Amino acid sequence: MSLPHAILTALLERPSSGLELTRRFDRSIGYFWSATHQQIYRELGKLEADGHIRALASAQPSRGQKKSYEVLPAGRAELARWTAAAQDPRPHRDALLLRLRAAAVVGTAGLEADLRRHLELHRRQLAEYEEIERRDFPPGKDSPEDRLRHLVLRAGIDLETFWTGWLTQAVEEVAALPDEGEGAH
């Protein structure tokens, strides 16, 4: 996924200002595609220059007033093209997994505590996703749009469920290892 496509998606859902977009990224899209405020504003400029979005006319133009943007037909067409295109999965990169591999040769000092910290973070994220599911997807809310949004949320719930299970196992494994300063060579 790319940031321009994430922005086009958000703007098609609801025309927004740059500030509103950054807040929406912080609350929803950012769970699976993060971007800084600067990246979002920079991309808005590119999308506007490419003719994919435009600033909405303001009722009372004034200096410093926030611009709201909407998607133009060319932007909708680009998003549809991108959505329909095939894309291969990307290899998963995770520093924690690499650190575990490194611990096999240099020892596990400090690793158990960090695994426990990661476990707690994933438990909190899982609880947040489950609360969003309870709040936003009650039984019977099954329009095509809602079903697709819920499918994305379910991916997040399933991933967090995996990580909490795996991290629980990892903590147990690391805690059971002999207390050595150095790993095997």
Image (spheres, rainbow, N blue to C red):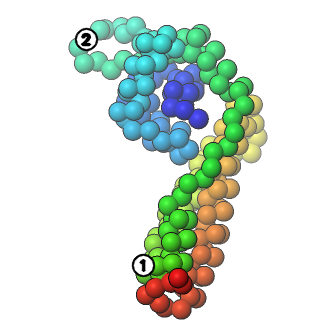
Q: Is 53 situated above or below 96?
A: above
Place of residue 9 in the rendered image (x, y in percent of width and height, measured from the top left) = 57, 27
Place of residue 98 in the rendered image (x, y in percent of width and height, measured from the top left) = 53, 65
Answer few, some or many: residues within 10 Å of disc 1's Cα (few below 14, many 20 plus, some between 14 and 19).
Answer: few
Q: Is 178 situated above or below 24?
A: below
- Residue at left 38%, top 26%? 42
- In the drawing, does residue 180 fall left or right of residue 126? left
List the residue tagged with mark 2.
62
Name the element at disc 2. loop
Q: Is 110 situated above or below 125?
A: below
Q: Which mark is residue 102?
A: none
Q: Residue furthest front?
A: 185
Residue 35 makes an appearance in the image: yes
87, 53: nearer the viewer: 87
Three-letter amino acid code at the position of disc 1: Gly
- Residue at left 54%, top 84%? 184
Looking at the image, how many numbered discs can be counted on the residues?
A: 2
Place of residue 85 in the rendered image (x, y in percent of width and height, measured from the top left) = 71, 27
List the residue tagged with mark 1.
110
From the image, state whether disc 2 or disc 1 is nearer to you. Answer: 1
90, 113: nearer the viewer: 90
Residue 14 makes an appearance in the image: no
Place of residue 172 in the rendered image (x, y in percent of width and height, measured from the top left) = 59, 82
Answer few, some or many: residues within 10 Å of disc 2's Cα (few below 14, many 20 plus, some between 14 and 19).
Answer: few
- Residue at left 67%, top 49%? 155
**Separation of marks 2 and 1 at Cα, in angstroms:** 55 Å
**Quarter placement of the N terminus:** top right
